[in-house]
Amino acid sequence: MMKHTLIPASEFATRRTRFFEQMPENSIALFNAGREVTRSNDTEYPFCQNKNFYYLTGFNEPDALLLLIKSDQNKVVLFSRPKDALQEVWHGRRIGQELAIQEYGVDECFTLDQIDELIVDYINAKTSVLTCVGENEAFDHQVLKWITKVKSQSRNGKTAPATITDCTAIIHELRLIKSDAELDVMRKANHLSGIAHQRAMKQSAVGKFEYQIEAELLYEFAQHGARYPAYGTIVAGGNNANILHYTDNSDSLKDNELLLIDAGGELAGYAADITRTFPVNGIFTTEQKAIYQLVLDAQNIAIEAVTPNNTLAALNSLVCDFLTEGLYKLGILQGELTQLIEEKACKKYFIHGLGHWLGLDVHDVGDYQSNEKREQMRAFAPGMVLTIEPGIYIPLNDLSVEPKWRGIAIRIEDNIAVTSIGHENLTTTVPKEIAEIELLMSGSTSN
């Protein structure tokens, strides 16, 4: 049975063809699969495939090696674990070499123990070896060993490549622009993740623990086919939300406090990344409403500005101006408004970037073309997917503001695809308007 049913095998073949088109003549590209990582003693963490390798193959077994050989007739070669009845009884089924050729569209497939025997001939007489230099130091050393092995056989007529080329930028650019099939998977990932956020809102109650709400999210992910979260789930009540990457999820939920949840499921390797902030008891206080509406309005302004040829830098400028003026009107920022805007004074409370690329990684690959001021100048193009996630964070120990504001932390995050005429918001199944959240939570239960 094929393991990548949400992305057809033809899509992976197309990706390889596009990579071949950017390879120099008479070259070979090498991509390593991920490895199983020991958690403790003889147990492993859940396996996560190397995303570049997966992007080109859809193959989800560890330790494999992909060769793309550019010549008069391009060739795709895979090395993978052999069929082994005993190992499969203990650790699960393996694809094997025959099915890899049939189902994954490779031209040849050999067992891992054949690599050292065959790779010299594959590398021999090539002018260049391409690999993702720096991604995996051990693999970089292995590639050098293979090239050295070819050199050692020069008296036998073998010729080693003259150059090693870093192909990271090539595959990252390919991954940055999503295909229709990828966008469809990301819609599904957002759909199920939004339903999970709804469940979390309904199940939240004073006295519950953050980890109990995390369990509700993970349950809903799995119910819809996302076995694992795309990243460490953040369930942060009250002042915990002022810790941006809070994942302890160990405290109890308190009355009149907010709960910030940053969570997304991973489906067929693709991440959703959604954040919602809502009152534990289902009703926003006056101060919470004021900050929440400011953040929501800022997010809506930014999302509307996601169009081809615009940039994250331009969106950041829009949002910073808006948030600065809003915080000034609330009395949280003091001074002369023009100067505050010029100084981007909101950054005291909006302490992270506005968004990032999204795809096979939650912080996905792709050049932002940042300038010396760290402004992200890359022009949006159809097929890009990014998050839009403004936030305001006012820690309890901020004595520069009135006590009523302290401890409030709000982030709202949606996943946005750039289209030829504007954008598509992929995050459609979880509310973010104040009235919608309160209405949804009014039917919540404590069980």
Image: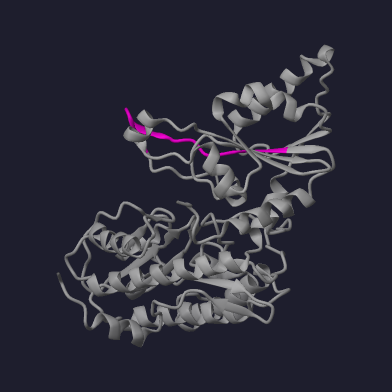
- Nearest the eye: 55 or 211: 55
User: What residue is rendered at 69% in x and 45% in y?
Assistant: 168
Quadrant of residue 159 within the rendered picture? top right
Specify whether residue 33 is painted magenta.
yes
Residue 282: in sight, yes or no? yes
Quarter of the image for residue 46 reads top left
Magenta run includes residue 338: no
- Bounds of the magenta segment: 29-44
Residue 393 is situated, as x and y percent measured from the top left of the image, at 43, 66
In this rendered view, identify the residue nearer to me: 205 or 267: 267
- Vertical relation: 310 (above or below) 101: below
What residue is drawn where x is 52% and y is 34%? 63
- Residue 434: percent from left, percent from top: 36, 84
Residue 354 in view of the camera:
no
Side of 326 where 435 appears, left or right = left
Residue located 53% across and 79% down the image: 298
